[in-house]
Amino acid sequence: MTDSIINRREALHSAAVAGIAGWATLSFPAFVEANSDVDEELVPFLNMPRTPPNRLDWETLEDWLTPIDQVYNVQHYDVPEVANNEYRLTIDGLVNKPQTLTLDQLKALPQRKLVSTFECGGNGASKGFMNAVHNSEWVGTDLAELLKSCGIRDGAIEVAFIGYDKKDETLRKDTKRELTFNVPFGRSLSLDDAINLGALVAYERNGQPLETRIGAPVRLVVPGWYGVANVKWLRRIEVRDRRYMGRFMARDYVTVRGERNGDDIEFVETSVSRMHTKSIIARVMRRGEANGNVPLKAYGAVWSDGTLIDRVEVKLDDGEWKLATLAESPRSEFSWTFFALDLGEVAPGKHTLVSRGIDVKGNIQPSEEDDEIALKKTYWEAYQQWPREIEV
Amino acid sequence: MFSLNKFLQLLTVIVLFIPAPSFGETGSIQGKVVYKTDKSRPWRYGRYYIKNSRTGLLAEAVVGLKDRKLATTNEKPQRFTIDQVDHMFTPETVALQVGDSVRFTNSDAALHSVKTNDPANAFSTTISKGQEHVHSFLWGGNFKPAVMECAYHGSMRAWVYVFNHPYFSLSKENGEFTMNNIPPGTYELLMHHPAGRLVWKKKITVTAGETINLTIEVSPENLIE
């Protein structure tokens, strides 16, 4: 699979559903230029913490590709400094031809670009952590081709990705069976996913070498999967005949969710993996006053695991859901799409507005009250609608 | 082995027991910090520190004197609190005197840590929700703040400015700052805004019995890279 720019027919499908004709002036260029429009003024969201550097600043969002000073980093072990000339990537396990590649050897292999929206598995879990998301253009080596070049042996079912970062882990703490061991960070994909998801062994982001804090010199990028699957400081790729059960597959980044079975609720544990269809109002802009009311526009972004977005709807206070306009371009299969909606002239006072993304498979971004969120007991995969409060 | 930290602690104890010299009459410096916007060089996060873009009054700027001779005893050590809430150190910027301490807490459900690589105040600790860690700052870096980070959440930052004298001030929401009881003399007056990466300085002469009223005006020209 390659990163496919969505063709015009597909893009227009969404636009047509949204009734783009009436919103021609709200297409993507207006969003890009919103900050430079001297007549428009930002309406700050109420009750929101500051956005620090190295996180996406929603209220000033302009760039389809996120600049590095707004790219988040979360790590659970150390942040290893791996010199380019000392870097080695080993591919071993159930392969006919194990390989150890230097960075130069890796870069000499055929390159591929991948544009994808990249989201932390915990993004949206709290109002202080709803900006761990970015859209990036990666360059690297196709994972599937790399694996195939090593010759995958019969019996292989899974591929583990191991980083340079390590830490002591303790199991069954404060019991007689306590066990402490030093272990590298690791995640895995099924062999089928490793071959078919279009994953990249990446060494460039937005035309630049990776920064240490985001995985330099080489990291895994799995389009459409939450950040934890995208192993940073990638050291080893091991093809295995049994499941890899490291902390971040089996004990952590595990979503616990209740599922209704008749009158019962049964809890199910699943490993954080594919991203969900999700949208957010990025900012609201006002333009002067009209008849004592305030003309407002809302702008935002919507993304998914690669499933085509059908539409975005926006609701102001207790009003009806209204169709937003999806930007026609730029678009890419795994990237976010910007949207905009003219909210009309709004009465002075406090208001709440919220968006919901809907994809072509019929997935509707749930509210906090919907079962799939209300019965979720862990904070990962926080793809619920996010109401924004404003005062005009 | 006699570590650097031990040495610094001993030195701090010595400094703490030096009585404040009697300076007789003193002077004051007060005023406000104003940020002049340049639309061609927008400050992305300025909205958090400047409530009114027309006045430009700048909050959370550290204003203080830089002079080694000013080192004095901290007779009433204070305890400050920096909470980790909504994945932010709150407050972001703290200015204190050698001997003061900070109580670090975590109000988030997420696990956080506090660490600083500041050579004189280095420490690292993990803090779960409801836990706390108290750290005493025993060595003054003055305008070289101890930068606090969370090991897990790379964008979390706090700046602790540790002064070895009491002649400093953190500007309020209205941009105002005040420093009193300053011994007469000529000093270097500095302004740092760590979140905005703004730096300003000026020679200033304090005269006994007088208050200097000052407007510190900064712009993107004061940005450091």
Image: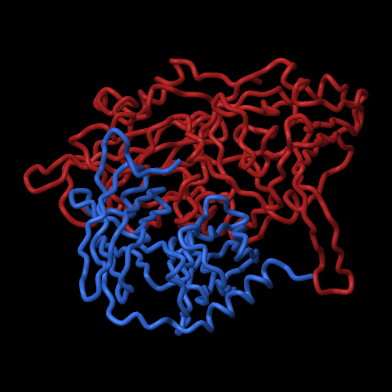
Chain colours: A red, B blue
Front-most of A362 and B213? B213
For residue A273, which quarter of the picture? top right
| Left or right of A345 on screen, residue A224 | right
**Residue A186: where, in percent of width, then height?**
76, 45
Front-most of B146 and A162? B146
**Residue B39: where, in percent of width, then height?**
26, 36
Above or below residue A133? Residue A16 is above
Residue plotted at (58% across, 70% down): B129
Query: Does residue A198 appear anywhere in the picture?
Result: yes
Above or below residue B196? Residue A197 is above
**Residue B121: where, in percent of width, then height?**
60, 66
| Left or right of A376 on screen, residue A43 | left
Report the quarter where the N terminus of chain A lies: top right
How many marks the image carries: the answer is 0
Front-most of B174 and A15? B174
| Left or right of A366 on screen, residue A354 | left
Residue plotted at (38% across, 37% down): A61
Residue plotted at (73% across, 38% down): A82
Query: Does residue B111 appear anywhere in the picture?
Result: no
| Left or right of B127 on screen, residue A124 | left
Above or below residue A235? Residue A26 is above
**Residue B34: where, in percent of width, then height?**
25, 53
